[in-house]
Image: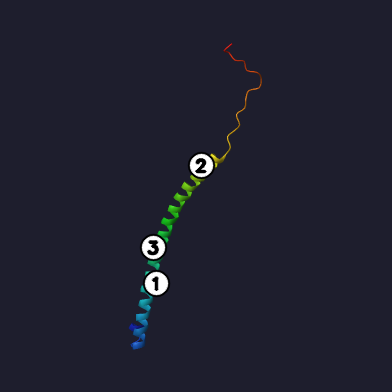
Amino acid sequence: MAATVLNSSRAVEMSVYIVRAFVRFREVLSSHRELSAKLGELEARLDDHDQAIGGLIRAMKALMEPEAPRKRPIGYIRDSGD
């Protein structure tokens, strides 16, 4: 670092700032990976919930469809009881 080349208090101070910046950068990257993993978990859960909700909606639509009218056969039907 600069402190190894330059022998001044300012060079030492700058070296400390640089090390602190890299430590902070590493912390940010670590938290970013954790956030990314948590978002992935959340997305997987939402996909499961979306499928479940889609199933419920399909079932409700099926229940809302009107029943097909029952058609009577054409013609006269004789009672066989006579």
Q: Is residue 25 above or below residue 65?
A: below
Look at label 3 and name its amino acid: Glu
Q: CA distance from mark 2 to mark 1?
A: 51 Å
| Front: mark 3 or 2 | 2
Quadrant location, the N terminus: bottom left
Q: Which residue is mark 3?
A: 34
Q: Is residue 8 visible?
A: no
Residue at image location 42% in from the left, 61% down from the top: 36
Q: Which residue is mark 1?
A: 25
Quadrant location, the C terminus: top right
Residue at image location 39% in from the left, 66% down from the top: 31
Residue 48: which disc? Answer: none
Q: Position of residue 57 (x, y in %)?
A: 52, 45
Look at label 2 and name its amino acid: Ala
Left or right placement of residue 80 versus residue 20 in this view: right
Q: Residue furthest bottom?
A: 8
Look at label 1 and name its amino acid: Phe
| Front: mark 3 or 1 | 3
Viewer-proximal residue among 57 and 82: 82
Crowdedness of circle 2 by 10 Å Cα count: few (<14), some, many (20+)?
few
Q: How is the image coloured?
A: rainbow
Q: CA distance from mark 3 to mark 1?
A: 14 Å
Residue 59: which disc? Answer: 2
Decide which of tag 2 and tag 1 comes sooner along the chain.
1
Left or right placement of residue 14 versus residue 82 in this view: left
Q: CA distance from mark 3 to mark 2?
A: 38 Å
